[in-house]
Image (tube, rainbow, N blue to C red):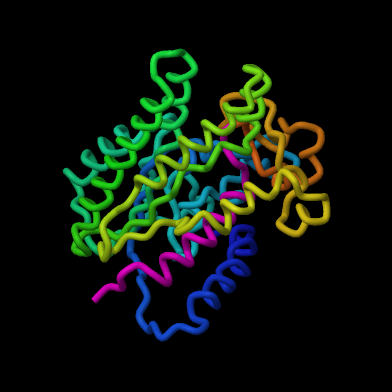
Amino acid sequence: MSRRLKSILVPMLMAALLVGCGGSTRVLHYTPTSLVAFGDELSLITPAGTKHSVNLLKTGTTTVDCATYPVWPQYLASTYGMVFSECNPDAVAQPTAVMKAATGAKVADVVSAVEAYRAVTPFKPQTLVTLSAGLNDILAAYAAFDAGSLTREQSLSQVRIAAKQLTTLIDSITAGGAGARVLYLWPVNLRYSPYASAEVTRTGQEDRRLLLDELSTAFTTALTPGPDTGSSEVLLARVSIEQKISDAPGMNAAALSAIGLTNAIDAACTVSPLTACTTATLVEGAVATNGSGYLWASPQLPGPQYHGWLGQLARQRAWETLLPLD
């Protein structure tokens, strides 16, 4: 693990450990020996070490420092001393974290990726699987409604079907506790995103913001893996990070600063694709914090602070709720 990444992770990890231990009688905790990340842009590290977020450049260079501003599975893996081959600055001989996320992946794509992987490498309890899916299904359903090919209820039904498909996948991976352990992520709610604001402006309909919220809620409500399967959702209830996202647009500067932000309304990056966004391609207001002060990296995808929140919460969930190994 790089020295810089350790400096970011250690304080957050200590906080997570204290939460996990305080007031609890649990003695055994889950400690995986490998991690596999499946999903969409929220989990991806490309072979070049870039992410769909702000990518920090090493001082005085045009080289991306992939270990800083980790995406949430990368953060989680690092707390177990694991790295992905896509970001291995310390040249660990055998990275034990595997990246299987893909740009634009919908739930069906994630299902296919999981099936292809386990056909070669069966899941076992020592393997921690992370899943992020649903955001692109929500965006596709919204686009179909916008184009007139789906009614509002049909678009909501479409995302519910996708969520049920993901539910089935999670249950199959965990195999009632006999398979891998799973941490799965709710898609980010786009209601307060720059994308939602742009859609309201484009259509002149404030209801478009509400529809994006309804689609997100329909997905998360339908995502209900079975109990006692060795799985855990990273966002257990619509609190914590979700509450920060909903509250942040109305916060004053001091309140934003208290949660590590300077802007919760605009996107920090000026380029597309987002994997090309670096600290050299930021909007003027994001430069002072190297992009970390902006909640949103792009109109639809959150930035480094969001991934830090997720990583910390994912570690806490893994520590507190995943079934320990025998």
Q: Tell me which corner region of the image, top left, top right, bottom left or bottom right, holds residue 162.
A: top left
Q: Quadrant of the C terminus?
A: bottom left
- Main SS of the magenta part reads helix
Between 12 and 64, the one nearer to me in the picture? 12
Q: Residue 325 in magenta?
A: yes
Give the magenta range.
Answer: 300-326
Residue at the image position 73 percent from the left and 50 percent from the top? 261
Residue 182 spot, x, y in % from top left: 33, 57
Residue at the image position 42 percent from the left and 72 percent from the top? 320
Residue 90 vs 25, above or below: the answer is above
Residue 156 spot, x, y in % from top left: 40, 32
Count the numbered circles shown: 0
Residue 273 spot, x, y in % from top left: 56, 26
Residue at the image position 38 percent from the left and 48 percent from the top? 131
Q: Tell me which corner region of the image, top left, top right, bottom left or bottom right, holds residue 174.
A: bottom left
Could you tell whether 5 is left or right of 184 in the image?
Answer: right
Seen as rendered, the residue at the extreme top is 148
The answer to whether residue 45 is visible is no
Residue 47 spot, x, y in % from top left: 45, 37
Residue at the image position 34 percent from the left and 32 percent from the top? 157
